[in-house]
């Protein structure tokens, strides 16, 4: 088991580091450290606007979110990873060829994810804060506590996703029922008792009032969720081979208005057969956004009317832009090199498929604005959401070409992405706080977006593709 | 055999990977109707050579034309015309065999793909795998699919990288016959392999690569005239080279 663990760790490191070179990848945690360190100095500033309690809630929720995203990528993305790195190369999925039980491998996989991302994200973040804390008059005990509670928040996210995704693999209705129950319970408590369920998030409670019992309880939640996930886990590869009716040509015909109908048809088939259409929509889109809504609703009294909805629209746009990773996860350019398909054509086609997927955030924004009686801001919210999404897509295409899922861990790429997107978002947020209708200005983002896409074409439409 | 120039013309091709010169100043010429074998041990640069000739990677020196098109300037144009079997068979995971061939048909604008695909399913004996996802296919079946994909549009030139390696002897025999027949009807094939016996049986011309360098080009007929076997010839060449 330990050997398996160390091998998986090496593998994870190898995957990331061979892609950008060890240095660029090793810089990633350094960068997180730097951001946290510098961000800490803004704290006194923030605190005049946002109460400290809300700030801690936000940070904990962010790490919960991180756990969810990492977990979703590890599991939902398993097919994708498999494809990219070859069937045999990922130990986690070679259960058949090793004399180890599937559960054991999965268990090791979970532990590996935990340790790996702890060092990649959690430790550098809290480290940066800890080093900065003497300068801003925060007792060192706080970062120490934060290290514990943020780790637990991250682990809770991870274990919740592992749990939900194994439930999903076993029975889709069961997942639906569980999610519905949580939603009803949360909404019910909030509406009838005025209790915000987020305050019962165990790591957060622990942060506010540390006690050993609570610590035990928090760990128990994580352990039970993971244990159930591990027990429920089955390897899909044990299944007998499925057979499918031919769907490509009919689909391509129906998509004939696309620039490259067969490529678009293939994207759709990939999404639906891999199960990632529903899986990703739930785990990488709806759950994170549900969480974000919670966070933002905390800010209601601080923001101008409509502010929460518009801010939510912006964040939805940013998260919606990651749908580009859903459709690029299945093929590396390698599988096209024996065909007359250029990188430019592939990029164009992927962007069109992406546009099709934007129906999901479009509907979500409509639903949310109806539910929150924000219809007055519906149009600016929609424009904002889609403009931000396409702008963020354009930066992604420019920086990462056909491999966004792996390139984000290149520190240089991530910094550039955050910087360019950050500038645009700050301008937009400032504008929309002045007047919600100014949010419509965001359509102008299509201009620089177009420029970035052009840059992306020039950058990636070359013979030597990075081979992952 | 008389060569009509121009199907493949490589001049001083060069490719560097780190400290390794994967292909080191290789010049070749392949004429119409040849079944040209690119021979060499593992790691000698055969795959790299095919990738440069089909515009999949950029060369670090030299130049090449394929069917009159420059590999640097018009890689997509070349890939439209030729058929390629890559060394690693990577058909898309979530398409079935039939769908993959439909996909290739759509991308290459081939008429009547279904009928053509049917012929291949029958010929290579994998009809029972039509509706199975590519990720669930065995290596041999994937190789059959990749073989089909390369010849579906009846290209005038096919560049095929170790195409027989996952086939059983019966299938190898069948495919060898197909290739020999294919060039007899005026097409050209550029085949890489480290299995010398195959080359000796079906190739007309051949080239021997070793550590990226071209050691020899010639015809199988010449060797036969000298009553020499390809493997003896090959080993003596490679040994000589290693002593230098
Ligand atoms: N993408 C690559 N990166 C680094 N080295 C490579 C790459 N591709 C091939 N090589 C090296 O180039 C040499 C030739 O490889 P290859 O063309 O695959 O040989 P062959 O097909 O004859 O077995 C080998 O030494 C191999 O290690
Ligand atoms: Mg090779």
Image (tube, rainbow, N blue to C red):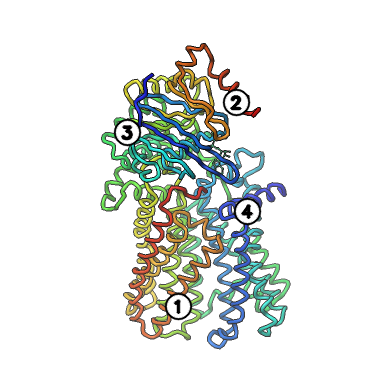
Separation (CA) of disc 3 from disc 1: 53 Å
Residue drawn at the location 45% of the way across and 38% of the way down: B134
Q: Label 2, secondary structure: give it.
A: helix
Which numbered marker is on residue B238?
A: 2
Instruction: Tell me whether the residue at label 4 lies in contact with that at label 1, contact meaning CB atoms closer than 8 angstroms.
Output: no
Under tag 4, what secondary structure?
helix
Q: Nearer the viewer, residue B185 or A159?
A: B185
Q: Which class describes the residues within 10 Å of circle 1: few (<14), some (14-19), or many (20+)?
A: few
Q: How much space separates mark 3 and mark 4, taking CA atoms?
A: 42 Å
Q: Which residue is mark 4?
A: A13
Q: Are marks 2 and 4 on the same chain?
A: no
Label 3: element kind = loop
Task: Name the residue carrying label 1.
Answer: A426
For image coordinates 54% across by 53% down, the residue present is: A75
For the C terminus of chain B, the quadrant is top right
According to the picture, the residue beneath numbered tag 3 turns out to be B153
Subunit of label 3: B
Q: Nearer the viewer, residue A354 or B36?
A: B36
Where A126 sits versus B138, above or below? below
What distance separates the C-alpha of mark 2 from that of mark 4? 39 Å
Q: Earlier in the sequence, mark 4 or mark 1?
A: 4
In the image: residue B39, left or right of residue B181? right
Q: Residues within 10 Å of mark 4 (few under 14, many from 20)?
A: some
Residue visible at 46% across and 33% down?
Answer: B27
In the rendered image, the quadrant that contains the N terminus of chain B is top left
Q: Is residue A240 visible?
A: no
Residue A329 picture location, percent across and down: 47, 52
Labels 3 & 1 near each other (Cβ < 8 A): no
Distance of mark 4 from mark 1, alpha carbons? 34 Å
């Amino acid at each position: 088991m330990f050997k398996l663990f160390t091998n998986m760790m090496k593998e994870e490191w190898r995957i990331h580091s061979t892609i950008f070179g060890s240095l660029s990848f090793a810089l990633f945690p350094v960068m997180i450290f730097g951001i946290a360190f510098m961000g800490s100095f803004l704290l006194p500033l923030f605190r005049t606007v946002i109460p400290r309690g809300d700030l801690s809630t936000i940070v904990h929720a962010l790490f919960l979110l991180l756990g969810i995203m990492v977990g979703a990528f590890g599991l939902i993305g398993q097919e994708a990873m498999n494809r990219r790195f070859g069937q045999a190369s990922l130990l986690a999925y070679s259960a058949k060829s090793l004399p180890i039980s599937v559960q054991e491998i999965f268990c090791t996989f979970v532990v590996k994810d935990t340790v790996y991302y702890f060092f990649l994200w959690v430790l550098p973040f809290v480290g940066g804060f800890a080093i900065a804390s003497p300068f801003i008059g925060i007792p060192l005990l706080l970062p120490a506590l934060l290290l514990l509670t943020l780790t637990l928040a991250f682990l809770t996210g991870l274990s919740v996703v592992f749990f939900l995704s194994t439930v999903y693999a076993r029975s889709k209705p069961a997942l639906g029922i569980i999610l519905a129950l949580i939603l009803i319970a949360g909404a019910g408590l909030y509406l009838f008792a005025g209790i915000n369920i987020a305050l019962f998030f165990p790591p957060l409670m622990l942060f506010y009032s540390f006690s050993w019992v609570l610590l035990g309880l928090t760990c128990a939640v994580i352990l039970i969720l993971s244990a159930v996930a591990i027990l429920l886990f089955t390897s899909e590869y044990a299944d007998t081979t499925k057979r499918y009716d031919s769907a490509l040509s009919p689909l391509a015909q129906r998509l004939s208005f696309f620039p490259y109908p067969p490529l678009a048809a293939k994207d759709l088939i990939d999404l639906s057969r891999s199960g990632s259409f529903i899986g990703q929509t739930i785990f990488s889109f709806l759950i994170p956004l549900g969480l974000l809504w919670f966070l933002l609703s905390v800010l209601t009294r601080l923001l101008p009317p409509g502010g929460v909805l518009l801010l939510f629209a912006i964040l939805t746009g940013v998260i919606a832009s990651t749908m580009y990773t859903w459709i690029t996860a299945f093929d590396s350019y390698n599988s096209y090199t024996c065909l007359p398909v250029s990188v430019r054509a592939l990029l164009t086609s992927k962007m069109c498929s992406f546009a099709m997927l934007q129906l999901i955030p479009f509907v979500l924004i409509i639903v949310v604005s109806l539910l929150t009686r924000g219809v007055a801001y519906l149009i600016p919210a929609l424009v904002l959401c889609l403009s931000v999404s396409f702008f963020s897509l354009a930066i992604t295409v420019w920086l990462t070409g056909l491999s966004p899922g792996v390139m984000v861990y290149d520190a240089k790429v991530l910094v550039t992405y955050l910087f360019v997107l950050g500038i645009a978002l700050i301008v937009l947020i400032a504008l929309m706080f002045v007047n919600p209708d100014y949010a419509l200005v965001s359509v102008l983002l299509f201009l620089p977006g177009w420029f970035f896409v052009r840059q992306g074409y020039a950058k990636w439409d070359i013979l030597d593709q990075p081979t992952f | 055999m008389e060569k009509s120039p121009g199907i493949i013309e490589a001049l001083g091709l060069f490719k560097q990977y780190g400290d390794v010169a994967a292909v080191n100043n290789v010049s070749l010429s392949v004429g119409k109707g040849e079944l040209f074998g690119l021979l060499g041990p593992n790691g000698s640069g055969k795959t790299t050579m095919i990738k440069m000739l089909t515009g999949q990677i950029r060369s670090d020196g030299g130049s090449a034309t394929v069917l009159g098109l420059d590999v640097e300037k018009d890689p997509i144009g070349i890939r439209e015309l030729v058929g390629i079997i890559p060394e690693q068979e990577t058909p898309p995971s979530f398409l079935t065999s039939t769908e993959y061939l439909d996909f290739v048909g759509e991308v290459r604008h081939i008429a009547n793909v279904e009928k053509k695909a049917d012929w291949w399913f029958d010929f290579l004996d994998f009809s029972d795998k039509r509706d199975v996802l590519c990720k669930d296919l065995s290596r041999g079946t994937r190789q059959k699919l990749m073989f089909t994909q390369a010849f579906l549009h009846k290209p005038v030139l096919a560049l095929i990288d170790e195409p027989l390696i996952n086939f059983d002897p019966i299938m190898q025999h069948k495919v060898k016959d197909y290739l020999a027949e294919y060039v007899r009807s005026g097409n050209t094939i550029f085949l890489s392999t480290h299995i010398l016996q195959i080359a000796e049986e079906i190739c007309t011309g051949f080239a021997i690569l070793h550590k990226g360098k071209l050691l020899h080009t010639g015809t199988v007929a010449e060797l036969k005239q000298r009553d020499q076997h390809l493997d003896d010839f090959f080993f003596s060449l490679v040994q000589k080279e290693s002593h230098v």
